[in-house]
Amino acid sequence: MIETAQLTDPAVRAFVSAVNAGDRDAFRAALTPDATMSDDGSDRDLHAWAEREMFSASGRMEVVSQADDGRALVADYRSDTWGPMRTTWQFTVSTDGRISRFEAGQA
């Protein structure tokens, strides 16, 4: 496993830290105001999805590997809703250093 502090990209590091801490404010701060996302290839309402799949379900990410300068992760994701699963995450980071889009899916 890769410790969150060792993730290469600062925006991705902030995202993972916020998810693992259950910190909604830090999560929103890691994203651009117009950020978008997809789950298994389907676009979703980012904030409704994050509340349901991450925060209300006690979601946690344990990063297994990173690529693309830290903007592509493979992580073991665990939530109260789905239990453990291996997932992939691809992040687009804007020029202001925040995430403008992420794509999550099962690995």
Image (cartoon, rainbow, N blue to C red):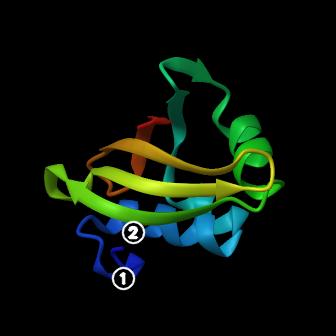
Q: CA distance from mark 1 to mark 2?
A: 7 Å
Residue drawn at x 77%, y 47% is 51
Helix, strand or loop status at disc 1: helix
Which corner quadrant of the image does residue 27 belong to?
bottom right
At label 1, which amino acid type do we have?
A: Ala
> Which disc is residue 5 wearing?
1
| Residue hosting label 2 | 13
Q: Quadrant of the C terminus?
A: top left
Q: Are marks 1 and 2 in contact (CB under 8 Å)?
A: yes
Q: Which mark is residue 45?
A: none
Residue 90, position in %: x, y? 34, 41
Looking at the picture, how far across and down is residue 70, in whole percent? Answer: 23, 59
Q: Is residue 60 left or right of residue 40?
A: right
Image point 33% across, 52% down: which residue?
73
Horizontal relation, residue 1 to residue 87: left or right: left
Q: Quick check: 90 left or right of 8?
A: right
Viewer-side residue, 89 vs 101: 89
Q: Amino acid at mark 2?
A: Arg
Q: Residues within 10 Å of mark 2 (few under 14, many from 20)?
A: some
